[in-house]
Amino acid sequence: MRGKNVLGLIMANVDDASLHQATGIRSMASVPFGGGYRLVDFTLSNMVNAGIGKVGVITDNNYQSLMDHIGAGKPWDLARKTDGLYLLPPFNAAAMANYNAGGIGALANVMNFLERSNEEYVFLTACSYVANLDLTKLFDAHEASGADVTILSAKGKAPAFENQPIAEEIVDGRIVRVRFGAPGKGEETWLIKGLLLKKALLQRLVREAHSKGETSIEKDLLIKNIERLKVHAYEVSGYVAAMDSLESFYRANFALLKKENFEALFPADRPVYTKVYEDMPVVYGLGSDVKNALIADGCIIDGEVENCILFRGCRVEKDAVVKNSILMPGCFVGEGSAMDYVIADKSAAIRPHKVLCGADTYPIYIGKEIQI
């Protein structure tokens, strides 16, 4: 199966509630990650690296930040005369009422887009996880197995998303039994929100489910049909992180400070593309002290930074101490302030001589443009 015969569909708002601190002003897809990226960058890059040339991004009404970031899709080579990148928000009040983030209502709203697309297959996925995937292997595995639907899966501790599907029994690659609910304590095979199937099958399943008032892709679209459809699991190898809480988001960012995780997420042969902002290199003052940190261009560091991730344009003034924290673009830390286990959203400002201290299991979150 060639990537050009696959239509990419991205559910931009799936699991927004799991990271509500950051998604109140944006979709899950546009949440900043890793010092210079957004969550959607990994999903889009996985698709274009596999040869997918047409991608639709299904979003709710909070899509301004996402639209500003992806634009016409030029960083991913999707700014094309034919095919390319399509933003698919609800188009009127009726569609908005029909929309349910990440659910069947959202898919029902884009039926016309599906009908006008010429691709035979659809890869439908969310942005609530980060991974660098070789989707060509998924395409080959789906074709070789003769499956109706192939779902991405991973082994490990299952995330705590609402209605998270966990495969309890897999026979010769086919998913036989699935359960929902709270994850167990040990290693499990959990199903990632990414699946591959024929476009015609997706259209039929969505119409059937929507006509019955059903809303859940996992429960109503797939699991109810698991006996009459051949549903297979494709196990993902390498680094995978799900954003099911503020704590997991914090830990997924800080996992990049380990070389093996960074190299797994950013391999040389499958680059991750993003919107690039031209800015000056990082400026380190004479009294600065930086240890084990990811720091983007445009930052000015005059204080102490340790075990941190700083996005572009952040400033840490003299005698300020920032440890174990994430500063999103444009954050300011005043002279003599101290921060430990803090996540500061865009353009947040910490005035001089303030002290903020959270914990690795409960980081403090400062909202966008908030001043402390």
Image: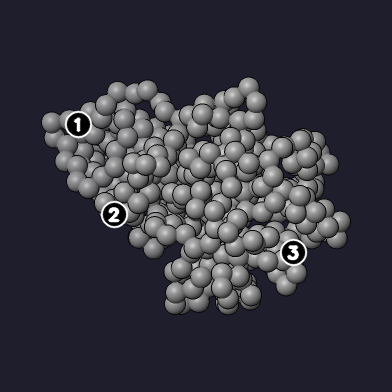
* Residue underneath mark 1: 284
How far is disc 3 from disc 2 in space, using C-alphas? 38 Å
On the question of residue 64 being in view, the answer is no
Q: Residue at x 56, y 65 (%)?
A: 233
Scheme of image coloration: one colour
352 left or right of 229?
left
Within 10 Å of disc 3 (Cα), the crowding (few <14, some 14-19, many 20+) is: many
On the question of residue 240 being in view, the answer is yes
Q: Earlier in the sequence, mark 3 or mark 2?
A: 3
Image location (x, y in percent) of residue 303: 21, 38
How far is disc 3 from disc 1 in space, using C-alphas? 54 Å
Q: Residue at x 49, y 73 (%)?
A: 188
245 left or right of 256?
right
* Residue underneath mark 2: 260
Residue 341 occupies quadrant:
bottom left
**Residue type pointed to by label 2:** Glu
Image location (x, y in percent) of residue 201: 75, 54
* Residue underneath mark 3: 220
Q: Residue at x 63, y 50 (%)?
A: 124
Disc 1 versus disc 2: nearer the observer: 2
How far is disc 1 from disc 2 in space, using C-alphas? 27 Å
